[in-house]
Amino acid sequence: PKQKYVMVQVEDEDKPVRRDIKLGKSKDKEVEVLKGLKKGDEIVKGAKDESADDEEDKDDDEKKE
């Protein structure tokens, strides 16, 4: 399965940072987060994990060679 993560705005960072999370129970539109977030964390909806793009680009470059 794909790793679950969210992008969180951190105080001293210009861009949101990735936080891996562990999900628990879900009901309707709510999901329990068991691990990975701290009280007060602000999730940035729609933010993109740029480090994942860097890895994908690196993989694509290796395939071309």
Image (cartoon, rainbow, N blue to C red):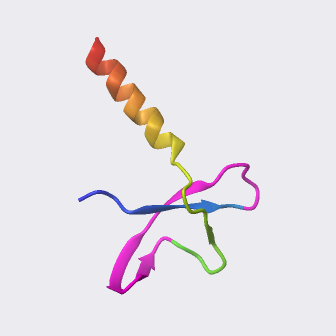
Residue at position x 44%, y 75% from top? 35
Residue at position x 38%, y 63% from top? 4
Residue 12 in percent (x, y) is at 76, 56
Please state if 15 lies on the left or on the right of 53 as rendered: right
Pick out the residue farthest to the right.
Answer: 12
Considering depth in this image, is 45 or 52 the residue closer to the camera? 45
Q: Quadrant of the N terminus?
A: bottom left
Q: Look at the magenta stretch and give its main secondary structure.
A: strand
Question: Does the segment drawn in magenta span residue 24?
Answer: yes
Considering depth in this image, is 8 or 26 the residue closer to the camera? 26
Q: Quadrant of residue 61?
A: top left
Residue at position x 29%, y 57% from top? 2
Please state if 33 lies on the left or on the right of 14 as rendered: left
Write the start and end of the magenta stretch as one range: 11-36
Considering depth in this image, is 4 or 27 the residue closer to the camera? 27
Residue 62 in percent (x, y) is at 31, 20
Please state if 65 lies on the left or on the right of 10 as rendered: left
47 relative to 26, above or below:
above
